[in-house]
Amino acid sequence: MSTPAQRARQLRDEIVRHNEAYFVHDTPLIPDADYDALVRELRSLEESHPELRSETSVTQTVGAPRSVVFSEVRHAEPMLSLDNVFDEEELRAWCDRVAKGLGRDARDISFAVEPKIDGLALSITYINGTMAQGSTRGDGRVGEDVTDNVRTIRNLPTTLSGVRDGRLDIRGEVFITKEDFHELNERQRQVEGKEFANPRNAAAGSLRQKDSSVSASRPLSFLAYQLVDLDSTLAFESHMATIEQLRAWGFVTASEIALVRGVDEVVARSTWFEEHRHELAYEVDGVVVKVDDLALREVLGSTSRAPRWAIARKFPPEERTTRLLAIEVSIGRTGRATPYAVLEPVLVAGSTVSLATLHNQDQVAQKDVRPGDLVIVRKAGEVIPEIVGSVSEPGRQREAAWQFPTTCPECGGPLVRVGDESDTYCVNPACPAQQLQQILHFASRGALDIEGLGEQRVAQLIGAGLIADVADLFLLSAAQLSTLEGFGELSASALIQAIEDAKSAPLSRVLVGLGIRHVGPVAARELASRFSSFEALAEASLDALEAVDGIGEVIATSVFRYCRDPETVDLVRRLRAAGLELRETKPTLEVPQTLAGRAVVVTGAIEGYSREEAEAAIVARGGTSPGSVSKKTYCVVVGDAPGASKVTKARDLGIPMIAGSAFVEFLASGTWTTTVE
Ligand code: IVH
């Protein structure tokens, strides 16, 4: 057991090490949640042992040492950090403290609640209305001069209209949208053979480049959240008024900022953000609650580290560390062998995780995770939990590197890797694991939606020799089922009825259910609405397939080959003989088809619509909403914090861009009156 003094020293050393890794090298060693836990432990030690307190302790300072690459910039007004709270109770306690500090009832205080963007803080100085300098936060007093790199950020105004004199510092967050991050990482993987751990690291690494042409090639965006009026040339009374001014100058600000009153509304809006966090264009790790009235802020003041008028409410972490117990391999419907991690159960983003994907052989090797390691697990929204990497534990003896198996754990057949693909496959078509997954996929909600066909049932039917593929489902009889364990007369006839109903399912759902490589629900819908029947699809030339909106060479080739595969021909013959219609019936047109045949790309957040809703609204009007801009694109709807690469591509190709705020009008008319630059 260590003494409190020893433990405090140990914690400080560790925190300093993590600060350097995070702030200087842009490569954190542990998840933020683990870091926060270290800081909290140190803070509570210092609170219970006053003799351990010191002004230079990492609990009292901001950020970290600067790198030597950039010259120093002394901030005219310090760039403070924020104190954190981690749950509703702590948030309520903070609101009450503010009210007490102001000698008011919390119900009479207005708070702005905004997303806490997970990027890095930047201060941009405008002198006499012209951009003059950009600097990172550094230790809060002195930051790094990154002006040349800041000039490459595309969504920044270089001049502030109407400002003739005085100095203004515009502060905000540099970030990379989730959309841009995926494209950037794809490129990084191909060109550099390595990826960024998350959008924040990518943004930090991209902004802090020695060579500004590298920054320029990265899709950096800026979101403004603070205006520091150093010469008091503008007289603002509230935070919201400064946000309006920032918007008027052309800065992107968080469109979801809400002005609320009292503790309950603060909590409600914070919960709203937590529930909608994955719909935002950028990653957020919490919300920031700020007193709106600037005069009240003066009354509250700041500590050396953080203002008393603002607080960060952190969301439950989406990354945690835990012990990797074993690596196993599962076989999917295409025979793909996916390695996955068996973990010591851990609470991530509100649910317990004990399995996480490791994607493929190369990922295991690249991440070098081995049984016994302490690993970082990530679970974001609906996405399957995955292993990010392992945490180094100096002094611990690791096991030997894990070897990918050479035979299928389910059927014993060989596992093979084809060409330069990173995936490994079980190539035995009779592999029961593959059959099971194919049938489950066919019956799943996104495909034919056959109720009552869960994993256990399908396994039972395969085991009894009644089915081996999806066509066999339609030959089952209630009499056959009722001989099986667990089936009564009612459940047998209910399942037969559900299978019967599936025969008239639209072609698009059957295409999804067949599991053609690269064909997801969007492509299936587009193909089915263009060709109407499987016959017509099977006869289509490669050119005809590629001419469909949203269908590129990869999907077209996959569909073309699939339709000509003798196994497909036989399967489709049997499905048709069993009574499947394999046709797409046109939906009844209740909504005017203002976008018939047009490809409309959506980027950024549109007020009042989640991304899915915006895309569905386009599809409902006869259009399509592909994920990328091409010369076939009709127009691009540009919401808040749009993907920089989509905007650049649209500009390069001369595709019209319309504002997200004009979306409703656009849906109704299919056209626009003004475009954005
Ligand atoms: S206000 C003096 N607002 O969070 C108050 N910060 O953990 C300055 N951040 O250094 C910060 N989103 O980099 C503020 N809407 C937001 C923010 C935000 C992200 C970052 C910022 C800050 C850090 C503190």
Image: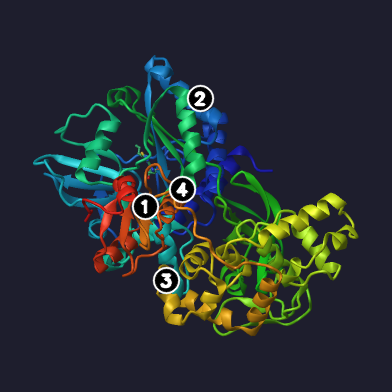
Q: CA distance from mark 1 to mark 3?
A: 25 Å
Residue mark closest to the camera, 2 vs 3: 3
Looking at the rendered structure, the secondary structure element under dot 1 is loop
Cα–Cα gap, marks 4 and 1: 10 Å
Query: Which mark sits nearer the N-terminus, 2 or 4?
Result: 2
Q: Is mark 3 within 8 Å of ligand 1?
A: no
The disc, 1 or 3, on the residue closer to the chain's N-terminal end is 3
- The image shows residue 189 at horizontal and vertical percentages of 46, 72
Q: Which residue is mark 4?
A: 279
Q: CA distance from mark 4 to mark 3?
A: 28 Å
The amino acid at mark 4 is Glu
Q: Quarter-wise, where is residue 457 in the image?
A: bottom right
Task: Work out whether mark 4 precedes mark 1 in sequence or the reverse, and give the earlier one.
Answer: 4
Query: Which residue corresponds to the image point at 86% horizontal and 54% vertical from the top-left?
Result: 487
Which residue is labeled 2 in the image?
A: 93
Tell me the CA gap for discs 2 and 1.
35 Å
Picture quarter containing residue 644? Answer: bottom left
Q: Residue placed at 45% from the left, 76% from the top?
A: 545
Q: Is residue 111 above or below residue 34?
A: above
Foreground of the two, 228 or 482: 482
Say which mark, if any, is on residue 604. 1
Task: Tell me the element at label 3.
Answer: loop
Quadrant of the displayed image that contains ligand 1: top left
Query: In which quadrant will I find the N terminus?
Result: top right
Q: Which mark is residue 548?
A: 3
Residue 366 location in percent, x, y?
A: 56, 71
Q: Mark 2: which secondary structure?
A: helix
